């Protein structure tokens, strides 16, 4: 098959056949299709979209490009969790030890940063000595010992997605519903937990900017999961401003530990508690009992203790004092008195990437100490000169004045306080 013809068919809006999709996925996992041709197909799908049938074919082909772990057969109560990507989204680092501390095993297939978001895999790299599980046997050993595992996508699990994921990050093809669905669900179905909790982001810092886009994505994810026999609980949540108050690898690990210790950022804590309660409810607890159990694990220290167990099981050191620290910080002040009317979360995400907390091209090394600390939230009253954010500089050379000006521009100051937006917008699937 001449793959140029396949690209041309999608470019011109034709429906891809099973053979077309198979050639695309096999070419990605084997290296037999050149990167430029894979990138062209990704762009064609991003622009032209894909039908439900094409999306299903893509999910199944990507799932079957590697091994099937069938986690649910060995650990029937295990729950998987995924976020569609946001700014300051540190939920996974809190969710896993919190839910595990409540007696429900947690499966985590971590990904690297994508676009303007920072990935869980990069955050874990900030923990000294931390090694993700490298095989099914190692992952299952972690589940048995500490109740959770973090694994990096490899040539074993959905290797086609591993290749396409990296290409999407550097070709502006991240915000594509069928590509997002195929990427997420191919990995989830390959790992094979029987329960899945989804956090679908909506707003300026998310790939889905509107509630309609977020609902379409959530419905597609739930439909694919339930069609494969997986129980799915999905939330659509607000990403009109950063979720947590830290953007960056080491900084977000610190934020997670603060929440696990019973404090931390209120929005990050609230959403993690909601998602954790859904995970416990899917395991058979009534919702009120699930919420009480989650809050108890945060208050009595068991969630923080479980974090230490999970980190040590993965070869890491849970001591936050050993996390990388920025070499310099730059405060960004408010230009005048007023209320924070809006925060351009995506702009702050790209600033964090520019500082080093993400990749601008394939092969870039992430600066684990770089990032942004958010010090004012939507609705806050601020005075002229009061810090809105702090830039955390690592080793990557940056134009500090330009970055500071961009950060200031990401905050809109008005004379009146804006109405408060709900953090949880809607629930679908098992969460409804």
Image: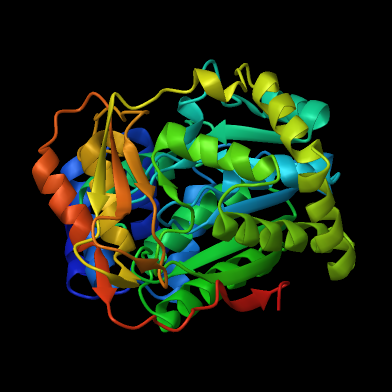
Instruction: Tell which of 73 and 173 is nearer to you.
Output: 173
Q: Which residue is drawn at 14% across and 34% down?
A: 398
Q: Name the side, left or right, on which 46 lies relative to 184.
A: left
Residue 177 higher or lower than 103, as above or below: below
Instruction: Tell which of 299 and 136 is nearer to you.
Output: 299
Residue 241 higher or lower than 324, as above or below: below
Question: Is residue 6 at all visible to an observer of this figure?
Answer: no
Q: Which residue is drawn at 81% across and 57% down?
A: 280
Q: Residue at x 22, y 70 (%)?
A: 47
Give coordinates of residue 365: x percent, y percent. Answer: 28, 27
Q: Residue at x 40, y 65 (%)?
A: 241
Quadrant location of the C terminus in the rendered image: bottom right
Instruction: Tell which of 243 and 20 is nearer to you.
Output: 243
Instruction: Tell which of 335 and 305 is nearer to you.
Output: 335
Q: How many labels does the image show?
A: 0
Here the colouring is: rainbow
Identify the image quadrant of residue 309: top right
Give coordinates of residue 119: x percent, y percent. Answer: 43, 42
Question: Is residue 370 at all visible to an observer of this figure?
Answer: yes
Q: Name the side, left or right, on which 28 lies relative to 55.
A: left
Give coordinates of residue 93: x percent, y percent. Answer: 59, 41
Identify the image quadrant of residue 303: top right
Give coordinates of residue 258: x percent, y percent. Answer: 61, 40
């Amino acid at each position: 098959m001449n793959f140029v013809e396949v690209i041309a068919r999608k470019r011109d809006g034709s429906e891809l056949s099973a053979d077309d999709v198979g050639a695309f996925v096999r070419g990605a996992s084997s290296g037999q299709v050149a990167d430029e041709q894979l990138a062209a197909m990704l762009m064609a799908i991003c622009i032209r979209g894909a039908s439900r049938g094409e999306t299903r074919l893509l999910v199944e082909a990507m799932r079957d490009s590697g091994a099937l772990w069938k986690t649910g057969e060995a650990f029937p109560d295990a729950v998987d969790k995924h976020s569609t990507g946001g700014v300051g989204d540190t939920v996974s680092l809190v969710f896993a030890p919190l839910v595990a501390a409540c007696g429900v095993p947690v499966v985590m297939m971590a990904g690297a940063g994508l676009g303007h978001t920072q990935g869980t895999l990069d955050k874990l790299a900030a923990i000294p000595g931390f090694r993700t599980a490298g095989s099914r046997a190692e992952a299952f050993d972690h589940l048995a010992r500490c109740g959770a595992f973090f694994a990096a996508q490899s040539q074993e699990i959905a290797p086609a997605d591993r290749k396409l994921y990296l290409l999407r990050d550097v070709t502006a093809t991240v915000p594509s519903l069928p590509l997002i669905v195929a990427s997420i669900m191919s990995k989830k179905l390959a790992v094979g937990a029987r329960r899945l909790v989804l956090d679908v982001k909506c707003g300026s810092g998310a790939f889905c900017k509107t509630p309609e886009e977020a609902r379409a994505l959530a419905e597609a994810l739930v439909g694919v999961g339930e069609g494969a026999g997986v129980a799915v609980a999905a939330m659509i949540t607000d990403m009109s401003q950063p979720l947590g108050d830290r953007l960056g690898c080491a900084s977000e690990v610190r934020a997670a530990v603060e929440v696990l210790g019973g404090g931390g950022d209120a929005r990050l804590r609230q959403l993690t508690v909601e998602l954790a309660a859904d995970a416990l409810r899917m395991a058979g607890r009534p919702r009120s009992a699930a919420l009480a159990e989650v809050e108890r694990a945060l208050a009595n220290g068991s969630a923080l203790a479980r974090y230490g167990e999970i980190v040590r099981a993965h070869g890491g050191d849970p001591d936050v004092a050993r996390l990388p620290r920025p070499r310099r910080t730059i405060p960004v002040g408010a230009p005048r008195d007023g209320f924070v009317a809006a925060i351009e979360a995506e702009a702050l995400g790209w600033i964090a990437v520019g500082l080093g907390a993400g990749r601008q091209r394939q092969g870039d090394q992430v600066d684990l100490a770089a990032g942004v600390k958010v010090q004012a939230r939507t609705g806050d009253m601020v005075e002229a000169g009061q810090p809105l954010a702090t830039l955390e500089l690592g080793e990557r050379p940056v134009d500090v004045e330009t970055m500071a000006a961009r950060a200031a521009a990401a905050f809109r100051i008005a004379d009146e306080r804006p109405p408060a937006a709900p953090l949880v917008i809607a629930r679908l699937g098992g969460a409804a």
